[in-house]
Amino acid sequence: MYSSDLKNKCYHKKGYILETDKISKYKHIFGGESWSYLDKNPLNDKPILLFVLDLKDSKLSFLRVDGLEEIPIFSYLNSDLWYEPQIYKINPEDKSVFFTDKKNHIEYMQSDEDKIMNPIPPKCVSLREMKLSEYVTDEDSYWKNSDEFLGGDSFIRILGEPLWIQNKLEIKCSCSQCMYFVMGIGYEPYNAKPKLIPNEVFFFGESALYIFFCKDCLEIKIIPQFS
């Protein structure tokens, strides 16, 4: 399953791991309600604001665009709407996003006890540079890092190369431009103390989400893969 594409211009050479136990001088936030959303086809689920990435952080200079100070990461998670790609556009003027494409009906909703709370209480997070061992360079490092990504301590990987758990994909924007890889979102260890949500392990399925960003039209595309 291992393959590498480090020469892809839409991947940043350096990758980072999200950390919850260190204070950053930048306003990287997990959860909260600092951005709003609009959906042309609202259903009985609401997207969750998962992250707000502060583009003032020099680590994220690869993603900077004039007039955009933050990148908000939303996703539906409490129904099967995230089983297929989701697309939204960022409007920095009023800090809102507009969903332009997603699954158009719900077949499955989580039970109330299994739903991820929405909104999630905001939590300041930081980014640390990946260790050499956290980059995927061969088959062995692929499997080792996959275990940390899905149910391990390194379940949020920012920039670098996507750690695909199925086939590698080439992601393009609706405008046909190459999209920049922002982050991969796995899930927390089942038996560990929750790091992101009070008294709740961050888990939406044995799966991962991959977030891509177009600098030209401020489009975000979210791609799911399943283990």
Image (tube, rainbow, N blue to C red):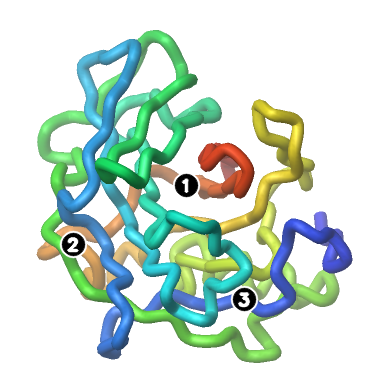
Looking at marks 1 and 2 on the same chain, the residue that comes earlier in the sequence is marked by: 2
Q: Which residue is mark 3?
A: 15
Q: Nearer the viewer, residue 90 or 106?
A: 90
Percent x, y for residue 124? 23, 74
Q: Residue at x 24, y 46 (%)?
A: 35
Of badges 3 and 2, nearer the viewer stands: 3
Q: Which residue is mark 2?
A: 197
Q: Secondary structure at mark 1?
A: loop
Looking at marks 3 and 1 on the same chain, the residue that comes earlier in the sequence is marked by: 3
- Location of residue 195 (image quadrant): bottom left
Percent x, y for residue 118? 15, 42
Percent x, y for residue 203? 33, 52
The amino acid type of the residue labelled 3 equals Gly
Assign the N terminus to one quadrant of the image: bottom right
**Do tag 3 and tag 1 residues touch (Cβ < 8 Å)?**
no
Q: Which residue is mark 1?
A: 206
The amino acid type of the residue labelled 1 equals Glu
The amino acid type of the residue labelled 2 equals Ile
Badge 2: residue crowd in 10 Å (few <14, some 14–19, many ≥20): some
